[in-house]
Amino acid sequence: MPLEQKVKYEGDCDPEFAKWVVGEIGGENLRHCIQCGICSAACPLSLYMDYTPRRIINLAREGFRKEVLSSFTIWLCSSCYACRVECPKEIHITDIMYLLKRRAIEEGVYPRSFPIPVLAREFGRMIFMFGRVNETLLVTDLFLRTNWFKFLGMIGLGLNLMRTGRMSFLPDTIKRRGELRKVLEALDAEEKKEKKEALS
Amino acid sequence: MKYLYFPGCSLKGTGRAYEESFLAVFKALGLEVRELEDWNCCGATAYMSVDETKSYALAGRNLAIAEREDLDVIAPCSACYLVLNKTQHGLKDNPELRRKVVNALKSAGLDYKGKVRVRHPLDVLINDVGVEKLAKFIKNPLKGLKIAPYYGCQVVRPYSTFDDQYNPVTMDKLIEAVGAECVSWPLKTRCCGGSLTGTLPEVGLKLAYILVKEAKKRGAAAVVTLCPLCQFNLDGYQDQIARKFERVDIPTLYFTQILGLAMGLPESELGIKRGIISAQAALAGR
Amino acid sequence: MSENKPKQENLPRIGFYVCHCGSNISSMVDVAAVQKYAAGLPGVVVSRDYKYMCSDPGQEMIAKDIKEHKLERLVVSACSPNLHEETFRKAAARGGLNPFYFQMVNIREHVAWVHTDKKAATEKAMQLVSAAIARVAFHQALDKKRVPVDPNVMVVGGGIAGIHAALTLANAGKKVTLVEREATIGGHMALFDKTFPTLDCAACILTPKMSAVKAHPNITLWTYSEVEKVEGYVGNYKVTVKRKPRYVKEDLCVGCMECIDACVFKEAKFADKFNQGLGKRKPVYIDFPQATPKVVLIDKDTCLHFKTGKCKQSCATACDRKAFDFNQKEETKELQVGAIVLATGFKAFDPARSPQYGYGRYPGVYTALEIERLVNASGPTSGEITLRDGKHPKAVGIIHCVGSRDAKTNKWCSRVCCMYSLKLAHLIKEHSGAEVYNFYIDMRAPGKAYEEFYDKLLGEGVHFIRGRVDEVTDWAMTPDEEGKLVLRVEDTLAGFVRRIPVDMVVLSTGLEPQADAQEVRRRFNIGCGTEGFFQERHPKLAPVNTFTDGIYIAGACQAPRDIPDTVAQAGAAAAEALALIDAGFVELEPNTSHVIEDECCGCKSCVPLCPYSAITFDEVKKKAVINEVLCKGCGVCAAACPSGSIVQNLFDDDEIFSEIRGILK
């Protein structure tokens, strides 16, 4: 068994990372964490995580950007907000998970074979196209992109949904798709402008 | 009383029974409900992971359309309910975000002020109508039916708009109002697995299994819920749960369905048959 | 107004000093710029800045300048006058200047500590300085009045703090009245079994002091009594106390308790408040065998006589001293005292506010105070650890920080819970042999021999799991957990979540201000901090003084504290009271109001406005009269007087208008 050296050098940290989290909406209280772990205890998914939510908060605070962004933890969060209401320091942990997920996508460091980031992306694409989401199409698409083998396991559920009339294969769409696109494109334009200004 | 109705994608798809029973019950109670004109997807939890500002804008478009009328918006889906409320909070508390979103909406001719109240149908039934008035509509009390009330996460968290976060009781009151028996259990607000049942079944199924198993263990003949995703997870995955853990077979109904039944509305109008685990035995066995 | 303005050439000679306060002020205010600015203001003949104006060399500089430069007025721009006004007045007096020819400008609390923009802060400091220099020209020479101090003292609250303060004062020869709300003195300490870290018996060390209070010739003990009203001022307080009826004459009852045996209720069936509801008592009762005074009382809400009027009153018949009096009424008493020590204690956090821990829902969940009674030999189970269902626990979980260190309840650390949890862990293990788990966030053991006590517990095999418990639940995941209470927690040192099944849960509830702390503080005219505990005059240097002279605080009414610190503070409060009394007099601030008799039109509008009842009306002269000893200088009368005939020292029109002009310049 190869022995792995566990020491971390300060050079491995990104000192800007915590500053960035604190500056984002929901990240404000990051530095106030007292590491009590009630978030992890309340979390229904912490037992599957590589780092418990408490450890993610500490790693983020200390600037371990790589560890945080490539963790499974942030993708396992189901947004049930149990941690957020329990946190004695009012840290918006769920929102921190969101902002870490966004950063992970931006930096392209999320776990590749993991279906959750793919779901998030496909979800966004479907909204941009139709304004609404058709669950059947979304799920089919997701499994074909990640693990078509698992899809076979879902056939029984699909038949059940068909039997009870809960499945539809036509994409639902809004009338004024142009209006929605205009809104989203206006935000893209604003972001571009901001980035340009930041560079100059 | 008049309300706007924001269905969200699920109530038009897998949660059809929720829409059917919600509309039927509200109509029978004399509450006017009008579907929000050209609504779009709220963005749910997934979109928040892709683009924060856009996810606020997405919900913002719905709220801006709703603002054209001076009515509360009812969002029966927990995710929609949370996202719309979260957007109101987020745009109120963050001036820079608000500026961006309001401008983007304006560029498409939409005007957002943040004056709409987003409500859950359970809140409307308990607080606008009231248990006393509901009691007058009960023709067919569900005597002897033991029900575990399941609130899930996003209606009570993070905002406790109309109920207690640790021990919500509004649905308990409704269960008692329809003459059924409310089973007390400690998992009322525990996560159902959310979208993980689909994306990571090895994890998601366990969460759904824990809930149905505990409800049954505590003597419930049915689980009653207020969210289409909760209903889908508890109801739809029981075959897979049986393969992976054990067969539980407990039906999961919407609170609007049990209220409709107690009010004597026909089952066909309430989507009772849309349950994958049939509720017939539970309803007949009491 | 303008004709009163001193002309440029007639201006008094003003000395101006600005303090750096180390870097407290100079880091946010450009002190040199302020000094230069003041040097150019009319009347200023000396302008200096200095690192610490309050230091001896700083004061010396002022005294020297007064003599050398023939200064007639003095302005010091530094910290709050609450801290150093007196210092600089004395410096002025040493230089030969009347101390009231002085004005202080607070540029620390009002400027440096509350701003973030140095340029704007400096400008604000200059404006305030300009105002003070403009007003000081109009200051008058004033003298302080002396009034005698009443040597008697009242101590409010009969817990260990009040007991110790009362005994100290009484031993010094002062007459003390100790007022306690409950039927017995002893407070929270009387509930405890053992005390940390020495594990000596609480009753063994407390009850001798309780008896000493009762026996002391200098102490009058009023239990079952509450202070209703406080009037007057330092050295001369008039206090109104309400004494609730016990329906038993205190001077006749000897505490033989035969009445309790004789009560028509053969079985004790009412919740025993002293035992935290774990035991039962009769309508006629005494809290515990060593209650002081050892006098029974009747609970009106449960006594058959009071509820129905149809009781044969067997208690009264059994009393051979004829101590019962069912017609006893509430009494109102008045006291004259020079000083007051407030030792009103704390309230334990109500765990119903943290519903996730299941208190009231699961019978196996207890508060720490309940466990104190359970492990106590004189408690409801005579010290046997028994659950509400009669079983004995095999595993016990102690959850720290319940109602502490949490933005949802109380943000502060309650300071004693870590240590009392260790004590309870030891006692529970000793009495029951159960496995004991402590769930803590940070172990706080900073007192003398406290860390050693923690070490002792570690050696005893008590489990210490670092993590805040999320939930107490009866939801079982494994067969082992069936029928147990399961605690879900992250073992933060191990890095994963654990589920620990126990039979008994102890909630280490935090300390809060008493429920009526706000009412009490208003009654005594003192302050409360944001968290609701009584506010000390200075957090380090005047911890037992309040902003009202002659009123001192001790113990957990000021902040959570343990017994050693409480006793030390009670001694300190007693010493402060003694210093006041033994000085024999107090000097009153001369910022009082007076009536210019010729101008008073006799409208009486000032009379009812005075919050201190210092204004009377002379019916012969038809003029208002102000008692300057009672006047607190609030200025209400001066502002309200329609004829402008009331003038307040240090706040007359010239002073205020020139100050405003100075700030607007």
Image (cartoon, rainbow, N blue to C red):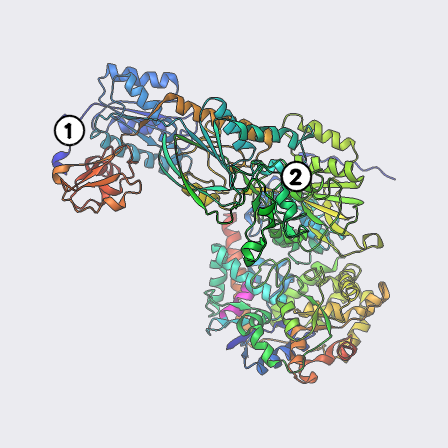
Residue C131 vs B136, above or below: the answer is above
Lateral position of residue C76 relative to residue A104, left or right: left
Assign a secondary structure to mark 1: helix
Q: Up-down: is C595 above or below C99?
A: below
Q: Give percent across and percent down for residue C476.
A: 79, 56
* Magenta stretch: helix, strand or loop mostly: helix
**Looking at the picture, do discs 1 and 2 lie on one chain?**
no
Question: Which residue lies under the disc numbered 2?
Answer: A13
The image shows residue C125 at horizontal and vertical percentages of: 33, 34
User: Which numbered disc, 1 or 2, marks the residue closer to the eye?
Assistant: 1
The residue lying toward the viewer, choosing from A183 and C567, is C567
Report which residue position mark 1 lands on: C8
The answer to whether residue C50 is visible is: yes
- Please identify the quadrant where the C terminus of chain C is shown: top left
Indicate left or right for C277 with C595 as reference.
right
| Residue kind at label 1, given as amino acid type | Gln
Contact? badges 1 and 2 (CB < 8 Å): no
Which stretch did the figure color magenta?
B56-64
Q: Which chain is mark 2 on?
A: A
Q: Is residue A184 left or right of residue C79?
A: right
Instruction: Please say whether residue C68 is one of the residues in the magenta stretch.
Output: no
Pointer 2 local density, CA inside 10 Å: few below 14, some 14–19, many at least 20: some
Q: Secondary structure at mark 2?
A: loop
